[in-house]
Image (tube, rainbow, N blue to C red):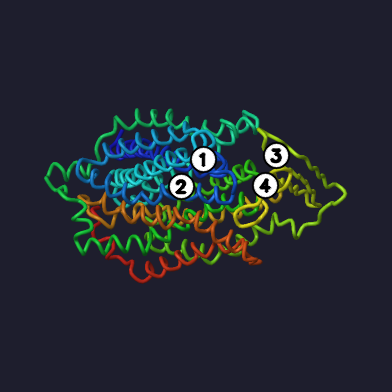
Amino acid sequence: MNNTETKKSSIWSVIMASSMGTLIEWYDFYIFGSLAIVLSTKFFPSENPTAAFLSTLATFAAGFVVRPFGALFFGRLGDLIGRKYTFMVTLMLMGGATFVIGCVPSYESIGFIAPVIVLIMRLLQGLALGGEYGGAATYVAEHAPKGQRGFWTSWIQTTATVGLFISLIVILITRSLMSEEQFDLWGWRVPFWLSIVMVYVSYLIRKNMSESPEFAKAKKEGKTSTNPLKESFGNRYNLKFVLLALFGATMGQGVIWYTGQFYAMSYIKTVMFVDSNQVDGLLGIALLLGTPFFVFFGWLSDKIGRKPILLAGMLIAILSYRPIYRAMYASTDTNIKTEMVDKRIASAEIKTTNAVSDSIYKVKKFYTDGTEYSETTTVHLKDGVAKLTESGDVDKQVKKSVLITSSIKWKLVFLVFIQVFFVTMVYGPIAAFLVEMFPVKIRYTSMSLPYHIGNGIFGGLLPAISTYFVANAQKTGNAEFFLEGLWYPIIVGAISFIIGFIYINKKVTKYTDK
């Protein structure tokens, strides 16, 4: 075997070891978001489903908010002692926290302690992910052959989407193996428990890895940093690069990423009310179709540069979101469909459980295009009279579900795929872009912070903020309430595009080591 083949074999083993662990960490992180609707009924009071769901999204977002702190802590550790050992620690921390979430008793069992424990575990997950990504991206980049950083680091970029994809597949398989009642009772815990097995396998793979050659060389020559935080953020020249990376790239990339994948999923489930199994299935197909483009755009960035692809992805996305989401909403909007009234099924009953009575009204509607709409209204009773909330409204829960036809499903697959395509444009080249902005001795620390602020805070808060905008617009009677959540990614993405367009230039790669 010649040297080139040996080098390629070596880089592939690096990719495998780094990607496997990073994929599992993303799986752990996103399994929570994939099950957000179910978790909202387990760890929060059930009186107000909307508030419970928003609380779940807020808990989900909390894991993103602390990612920059994980980036600082583990980034510093990675620049001091090495890339390998640091992201071994983050892997174990993430896996342990995920397993614990699957074991936490429900709110009904232990009260407010349940959401507190879950919040703490989410914070630990966020800290772990804050240290993982920078280590994996830096490790791969420092093994990559000259002129191929974009291509090789793009394999790491696929792990976030593949982790989300696997989380959806695991949920679908788990649901298919048990009844809906069993899944709701305890089956939702299985995806969290499986994490510990996956983490153990990844640990066995990673423990045999060697240190990054560039870091090992710097360490041997005594050129590592003694204070990575001070050199990264106390040095005004380097700080300018950090701020440019954040506001000119990762901020926009973050909101595009979470709009195209997480908000799309949340939107179809909670605004369009499409059946969860159908949503998981169509999203999984869209992710599978889109994933190869991470590698394509990473490779292309080696040929034409990172900036044109990053900024083109941002611009096309922010100009396309409103037409895309309008088309998505219209595909299941029963107000513009024709109901077959003679087929409508309705029922009403009083159900008493543990001396608590509920009036339950169910209606199922069928439409000429094959769409089926189900709605269950539960009114809580007290002494035979509807209970009132503190605001004076009737205390009731309304659960809606839409079953879509195959043609609508494939239309939604296409519309979500377009969004994933935008994600691949901005996310495929971002690791190489960030790595090339900073010198080896402070690279882990310097690149991790802007990445995790851009993704963890600007991106991670998107589902909660956008869902709140939609809910608030609906309350005020806005006719296009379903589009209001898009203002957040559009505005943030536009600001990032302008800053990146003006200030990102060839000088940004001044610190390139190869």
Place of residue 266 in the rendered image (x, y in percent of width and height, measured from the top left): 56, 50
The Cα atoms of the two marked residues, 2 and 4, are separated by 22 Å
Q: Are marks 1 and 4 in contact (CB under 8 Å)?
A: no
**Closer to us: 178 or 302:** 178
Amino acid type at mark 3: Ser
Number of other residues with Cα within 10 Å of mark 4, as a class: few under 14, some 14 to 19, many 20 or more:
few
Number of other residues with Cα within 10 Å of mark 3, as a class: few under 14, some 14 to 19, many 20 or more:
some
**Above or below 172: residue 477:** below
**Above or below 131: residue 465:** below
In what element is the residue under mark 1? loop
Q: How many marks?
A: 4
Q: Give the side of residue 313 with respect to residue 379, left or right.
A: left
Mark in front: 1 vs 4:
1
Lower position in the chain sequence, tag 1 or tag 3 = 1
Residue position marked by numbered label 2 in the rendering: 59
In what element is the residue under mark 4? strand
Residue position marked by numbered label 1 in the rendering: 43
In what element is the residue under mark 3? strand
Residue position marked by numbered label 4 in the rendering: 399
**Residue at the image point whose x is 38% and y is 58% from the top:** 250
Furthest toward the left, the residue is: 222
Lower position in the chain sequence, tag 4 or tag 3 = 3
